[in-house]
Image: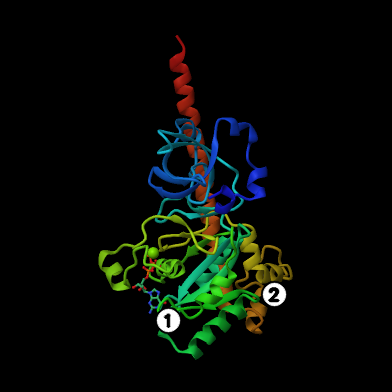
Amino acid sequence: MKLEKLGYTDWFKSNTDSNKLDAFQIARITTVFKDKYFIHTGQNSISAEISGKLMFTADSPLDYPTVGDWVYIQSFDNNSFAIIDGIVPRKTILKRKSSGRKIDVQLIAANIDCAFIIQSLNEDFNINRLERYLVMVQDENIQAIVLLSKCDLISQADTLNQVNLIQSRFPGMDVIPFSNTNFDGLEQINLKMKSGLTYCLLGSSGVGKTTFLNSLLGVHQFDTQSIREKDGKGKHTTSHRQLVSLENGAMIVDTPGMRELGNLQVNSGFKTIFDDILELSKQCLYSDCSHTSEKGCAVQKAIKTGKLLKDHFDNYTKMHKETLFNEMSYLEKRNRDKAFGKMIKSVKKSRRKP
Ligand SMILES: Nc1nc2c(ncn2[C@@H]2O[C@H](COP(=O)(O)OP(=O)(O)OP(=O)(O)O)[C@@H](O)[C@H]2O)c(=O)[nH]1
Ligand SMILES: [Mg+2]
Ligand SMILES: [Zn+2]
């Protein structure tokens, strides 16, 4: 297999530092376990670790390789082990706020061309959560396709209602209901997938991401678990992210279901998804209108006349507040980390003095 088959396109070629190619080879990260990596060179799958240099110069999770990254490597011991020395610039990077109270970035996957956002029709369906995923995905200009799983469990009429609901909130969105049980919709999804592109499965635990991957592979290669078993253990079945090559020439990353989806910094994704609200706010009487009870608020007026969905606006307000808070805390943390790094360096320096 060649690197091209793993998705190494002209874009990555032109972003690769050719000076490094005398000493290093290019490979793609396929799996990350804590500090251990698996990479594919186009010929072999090798376990790998990052170099000391990479570790010491990294000062944010963004500086570490993640699944889907193209990296510079040196292989040893007859291609049985490799050291990762650097990351080729990323075309896209899916990230979120790390879960819990910690304010830091967590990387989900790199160099994704298209994200399958999966919700199950029977119990997980939540349009505000879907909107959150869309902000995250569109922030990186990644194409989004919404997959509604378990359509075998609800009636065709109900399925159609959900599809219409999504399409009326997100006009033009690709929405495909499917089932891993009777394989409805799978052919339609297969037709959407393009050889050489990298896909990513996103969605809550239990919606059937891994089962879908197994359906695409045609074999039960990866573990899945019923929702009741998942609850019992209180944990997700898929525990790490993994890049898999499919027969149709596409690659796909399965991810563990996410309990919360906080955004740290959102720009274009937020602007795209909430474009209607941002446009309306320009017509508010006051430029700093909070769209709550001000006179001449165009947003509130649009809600009253039914032009704007209240649910959509509420989600906007919530995400806007959250993002501002996360962004501020993150910047504070970065500044503290930097100041701490400087302090350590100056202590080291002063120690070196005779
Ligand atoms: N009826 C029905 N059940 C499904 C379908 N797809 C998946 N399931 C079941 O849903 C349960 C959860 O599926 P998984 O594939 O493990 O879910 P997941 O999204 O990978 O979950 P995590 O790995 O925890 O994030 C399993 O019991 C599957 O058999 C479907 O289309 N229809
Ligand atoms: Mg899974
Ligand atoms: Zn307003």
Instruction: Work out whether residue 254 or residue 343 is closer to the camera in this orientation and state it.
Output: 254
Q: Tag 1: Cα neighbours inside 10 Å, few (<14), some, or many (≥20)?
A: few
Question: Which quarter of the picture shows residue 292?
Answer: bottom right
User: Which of marks 2 and 1 precedes in the sequence?
Assistant: 1
- Residue behind label 2 places its C-beta within 8 angstroms of ligand 3: yes
* Amino acid type at image mark 2: Ala
The alpha-carbon separation of the residues under discs 1 and 2 comes to 48 Å
Instruction: Work out whether residue 119 or residue 307 is closer to the camera in this orientation and state it.
Output: 119
Residue 108 point in image, percent of width and height: 48, 54
* Amino acid type at image mark 1: Asn
Q: How is the image coloured?
A: rainbow
Residue 279 point in image, percent of width and height: 71, 69
Q: Is residue 261 visible?
A: yes
**Image height of 65 relative to 6, above or below:** above
Quadrant location of the C terminus in the rendered image: top left
**Image height of 47 relative to 129, above or below:** above
- Residue behind label 1 places its C-beta within 8 angstroms of ligand 1: yes
The quarter of the image that holds ligand 2 is: bottom left
**Image height of 312 relative to 337, above or below:** below
- For mark 2, what is the residue? 298
Closest to the camera, between mark 1 and mark 2, is 1
Residue at image coords 43%, 67%: 209
